[in-house]
Amino acid sequence: MPSSRYVSPKSMYFREPLVLESGASIAGYTLVYETYGTLNADRSNAVLVCHALNASHHVSGVYEDTGEVGWWDNMVGPGKALDTDRFFVIGVNNLGHCYGSTGPMHINPATGKHYGADFPVMTVQDWVDAQARLADGLGIQQFAAVMGGSLGGMQAMTWTLRYPDRVANAVIIASTSHLSAQNIAFNEVARTAILSDPDFHGGDFYSYGVVPKNGLRVARMVGHITYLSNDDMSEKFGRELRSGEYKFGYGVEFEIESYLQYQGNKFSSFFDANTYLLITRALDYFDPAAKYGGDLSKALEKTRAKYLIVSFTTDWRFSPECSRIIVDALIHNGRQVTYAEIDAPHGHDAFLLNDARYHETVRAYYDRIWQEITEVD
């Protein structure tokens, strides 16, 4: 692995309180982030990549000590769709998350104990406000683009609403303007699994030296089902039995059961239960049209960015219809919108995978952004 692909996280400390949507505030917090590429002289080539539920600031490149590859390394890097030979890319771990930024597992300076369940409930708007402070600290007044998939796409949209003069382009992939009742229901099942785990201890499991692994396992299994399409699961697993015959019991017999158990066990070994609760609730609350009587066109009225919206045909969690609703609202406001609906079999997870049509669509969009930057220069 070339040394130029090795990356290291950085951190920025914020002393001033951040006032949250809930009315609460948090002070003395740290955001962990990574950067890739070089910021140009007029600081016009910066791109912010926002992460989804269980991703992090480690977007691209490789950690030299562990070999861990960034979660969107197939999309972001030298010569890739989001080309770090051209753009200065920033990945930030959201406040309240569990990969280094201040979150429930950290010590609350006011009490000397872990925040636990006392960590304030966050919203997508709160994360974007924290990211804006990070941008200020890096001396970036406007992003060439803010980009994200799923929950990351919600953040990209929120940037255009909350800071319309600070983002020139928004790349919103496999996302939605609000969760459906079905999606909220899945999140509630996942949270209930965690909350009912005896090892959760009301969110203070850190003090007991335990982890509510059973709850996290079930939460991840439920969530993972929603990330895959039926076609993808059928092709990968079908009704295949591990042993080739029924065991007439309640253990793991089907290959799909084994896969979900594996995903759940792996997830419960590293993810924080309070963070999972916090993020799924932020997903539930996201609804920029709510303050406008459900009128998304009205909510997007003051936006100024150009948009690339991408959806996937087999994504039943955030279906193409969800993206079309956003597109229609933007067109109603006269915004410049590029929309791509990719016929891919992988369900919601398609935004993380290699698909030539998808990646070339994103590449072409960034080519246009780069051309605009260089023409100005």
Image (cartoon, rainbow, N blue to C red):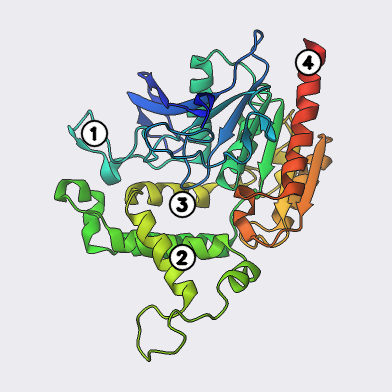
Q: CA separation, marks 2 and 3?
A: 12 Å
* Quadrant for the C terminus in the image: top right
Q: Earlier in the sequence, mark 4 or mark 3?
A: 3
Q: Which residue is mark 3?
A: 280
Residue 283 shows in this picture: yes
Give the residue type at disc 4.
Thr
x, y percentage for residue 281? 45, 50
The residue drawn where x is 48% and y is 15% is 137
Give the residue type at disc 2.
Val
Give the residue type at disc 3.
Thr
Few, some or many C-alpha atoms within 10 Å of disc 4 (few <14, some 14-19, many ≥20)?
A: few
x, y percentage for residue 366? 74, 30
Residue 27 shows in this picture: no
Q: Which residue is mark 4?
A: 374
x, y percentage for residue 246? 43, 90
Q: CA separation, marks 4 and 2?
A: 46 Å
Q: Earlier in the sequence, mark 1 or mark 2?
A: 1
Which structural element holds mark 1? strand
Q: Earlier in the sequence, mark 1 or mark 4?
A: 1
Numbered circle sitting on residue 107:
1
- Outermost residue, left side: 208
Which structural element holds mark 3? helix
Q: CA separation, marks 1 and 3?
A: 22 Å
Q: CA separation, marks 1 and 4?
A: 46 Å
